[in-house]
Image (cartoon, grey):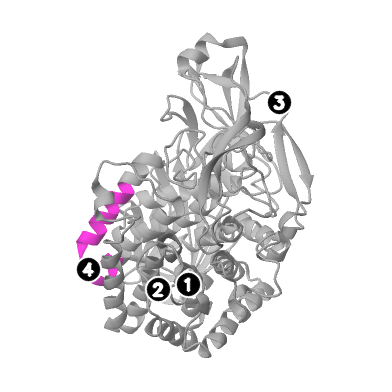
Amino acid sequence: MKFTNYPVNFIKAKGWTAEYLDRQNNGITGNIKKCGEPFDCETSVWATKEEIENWYPYEQHAYWIDGALRCSYESSNEELLSNIKNIIYTSLNIAKDRNGYIGPLNFKLPKENATEKALKYYHWPQAVYFRALMAEYEVNGDKKILDALISHYKNTPLLYSGRNACNIECLAWIYKLTNDSFFKDKAVEIFENYQTDTEPELTYKNLTDDIPFNIHGVTICETLKLYPIMYDITGDKKYLNMGIAGLDKLIEQSLMVDGVISSEEYVSGNTAIMAHETCDIADFTWALDYFFNATGNTKYLDIIERMCLNAAPAVVMPDFTALQYFSSPNQVIAKENSTHCRYTKGSNTMSYLPYGNAACCIGNVNRIMPNYINKLWHKNNIGDIYATLYGPCEYNDGELSITEETQYPFDFKIIFTVQAKHQTKRKISFRIPAWADSFTIDTDAKYTEEHGFICIEKEWNGKETITLTFSAKPILKNSSEGGAFVDYGPLLFAFDIKKTDETFISPRHKATFLSHHMYPTGNWNYALRKDLIQKSEISVTKNENQGYVWENPKLTIKLPAIKIKNWETQKTNSVERYVYSPDDSVINSCFVYKTISGDFEMTPPIPDNKTAKENAYGETEEIILIPYGLTKLRISVFPVIE
C-alpha cells in the first residue's frame, strides 16, 4: 500500500468532531441497550457461550463494538472503552474452549439444511467483528489478540461464497504482521474460489461488462475492497486494476448527490429519490479508503468527505438517539407509511427510529464518524504524514503533535499547530480538495505541490503554525434526471422543509429512545428560477449562530424559486414490496414480493423541466438553503425553469 491508517488512539476529536462523538457517547453508541432487540441482552452476543440460530445479531453487535471502540479512543471515553475491551477479551477466553474458534459454534460448519444464500453469511460476522480486534491490537500490541486470530483461522474450515470472502481482510492483516505464507495462500485460495461461486456477487466478469450491477449495496462495498487488499499482499496489479474498473462502474451507475451509492437494498440508479441504507455510508467509506491507500488517488477522499459531511449527519437525529434505515436526497415525508424504496415501499424504514426490522444500521451508524476522524490523517510507507481529510482534531505520534483548529466544512480556513518533541526532519502534506478553486498558505517554510497535496519537508523544532485557506464559489450543478442542486465546497445544500415531528416510544423491539415520524407543514414544491440565477452570482451568507454546528446553520444560500402545481406527495392504497416468506426457517429466511394494502403517502420524483414550467404559479420568491447535513425533510435536487 502507498498509504496506511494510523492506530485509532493517534487522533483525538476536537471542536465539533468532539461534540459529535460526545453525542454518540450519550446516545446510541454509549447506550446501545436502549435500542432494544437485539442489543438489550445482558452482555454482547460475542461475550457469551449462549448461541443464537440467526447470524444477524452477531453482525449487528460487531458493527457496534467496532464503532464504539473507535469512538471511545477518539473521545477518551474510558468507561465505554473498558466495556468494549471486556467484551473482546471475554470472547477470546471463550474461544480457548472451542479449539480457537471465535464466535458461535453453530456457524462454524455448514448445516445440512442450509441454502446457498444462508451459506454466504456463515463467517461474515467474524469479518466485521475482527476489525475491532485488529484496531485494539494496533493500539496496545497485545499478543493475545494476534495469537487468538491466528488460532481461529488455522482451526476453522473457511467458506468461500458471498460475504464469507470478506475474511480476506483479516487474513491479509495477519500476513503483513507475521509474514506467515499460510495467511496469504489462504486469502488467494478464498479469492479465486470466490470468482467461481455458483452465484457470484462481484467477479472479474461483473466488473468490466456493460450490465448494471444488481448487487446488495453493503455486499458490493465489502467485496469490492478485497481487490486492493489482494493487490497489497500479492503485488499483482490485475487485482487493483479490476477493482478500479468495478469501482468506476459503480460510481457511474449509482453515485448520488450526497456522495453515497444508491442501495434500495440492491444498487440502483442515482436520481433524487433513489435511496441508500445508512450502512452504505459506513461501508463505502471503508472501501474507498482501501482504494486511496493502494493508489494515492485523492478522488476517493473527495467522495468520503462528501458522504461523511452531508449524508452522515443527515441520517441521524442531532442527539444521536434515532436514525433512518433508508434515506434520500429528496425526502418530504418520513412516517410509518412513507418509504418510497422498492424493497420496503410504504413502510417506516425512512422514519427516524432507534430500532430497525433489520438492526444492521443501528450498529453500523456508530462506525461512520469515528472512521472519518481516524482517516483525517494517513502515513505513507516511509512514515511521511498526510492530512487527507479535514476537521478539528489533534494528531500525536509521540514525536510530533499537530493540532488542527477549524470550523471546516463551514469555513475553509484551517490552522495547524505543529509541536516537535525533539528536532526532527519530517514531511507533512495537506490534501487539495477537488472542489477548491485555489488556496493560500501562511508559513515560512517552502512547499511544493505533489499529486494533489501541498507538501512541506523540513526540520521541525519547537512550535510552528501553518494556516491553510481554500477558496470556492457556490455552484449550481445539473442532476442526472435534469434537475439542479447547489454545492459550496464539500457541502451540498438543501431546502429545509417545515415539519411536524411526532415523537413516541415504540413498544416494538423494546427500544426506549424516542421514535420520530415527520410530515411537512410548509411548502416544498419549488422549482429554481435558473434563468434568474444565471444573471447573478450565488452568494453565501455566514451566520454567527452559536450551538451545535449540525443543528444551527452556519451558512445559508438564497435562491429565486417558484411553486409548481401538481407536484405533491404520492398517495395510494396499495404498494408492492418485499416481505419475509413465512414458510422458511430462520436460517434460510428469504424475501418474496407481495402486494400490500393500506394508506400510503410517499415522496414523489421531481417533474421534468417542461412540466415544471407549464405548472409554475404565483410570484417568484427567495427560498433559503442550508447545509444538507442539518436537514431531515428536504429538497436538494430541484426542477428548474430555464
**Quarter of the C terminus within the rendering:** top left
- Report how far apart the C-alphas of labels 2 and 1 lie in the structure: 9 Å
- Residue 71: within the magenta? no
Say if 290 sits above or below 522 in the image.
Answer: below
- Report how far apart the C-alphas of labels 2 and 3 lie in the structure: 50 Å
Q: Which residue is mark 4?
A: 235
In the rendered structure, the answer to whether residue 154 lies left or right of residue 597 reads: left
> In percent of the image, x 38 and y 49: which residue is there?
432
**Three-letter residue code for mark 3:** Gly
Closer to viewer: mark 4 or mark 1: 1
Which of the two discs, 2 and 3, labels the residue nearer the N terminus?
2
**Three-letter residue code for mark 2:** Cys
Q: Which residue is mark 1?
A: 126
Q: Which residue is mark 2?
A: 170
Q: Which residue is mark 3?
A: 522
- Residue 345 percent coordinates (x, y): 57, 38
- Report how far apart the C-alphas of labels 4 and 3 lie in the structure: 57 Å
In the rendered structure, the answer to whether residue 564 lies left or right of residue 243 reads: right
Disc 2 + disc 1, Cβ < 8 Å: yes
Q: Residues within 10 Å of mark 2 (few under 14, many from 20)?
A: many
Which of the two discs, 4 and 3, labels the residue nearer the N terminus?
4
Which of the two discs, 4 and 2, labels the residue nearer the N terminus?
2
The boundaries of the magenta stretch are: 230-248
**Mark 2 secondary-structure assignment:** helix
- Residue 261 percent coordinates (x, y): 44, 45
In the rendered structure, the answer to whether residue 27 lies left or right of residue 450 reads: right
Residue closest to the eye, 185 or 382: 185
Among all residues in the image, which is located at the extreme front?
583
**Three-letter residue code for mark 4:** Gly
> In percent of the image, x 62 and y 42: which residue is there?
350
**Mark 3 secondary-structure assignment:** loop
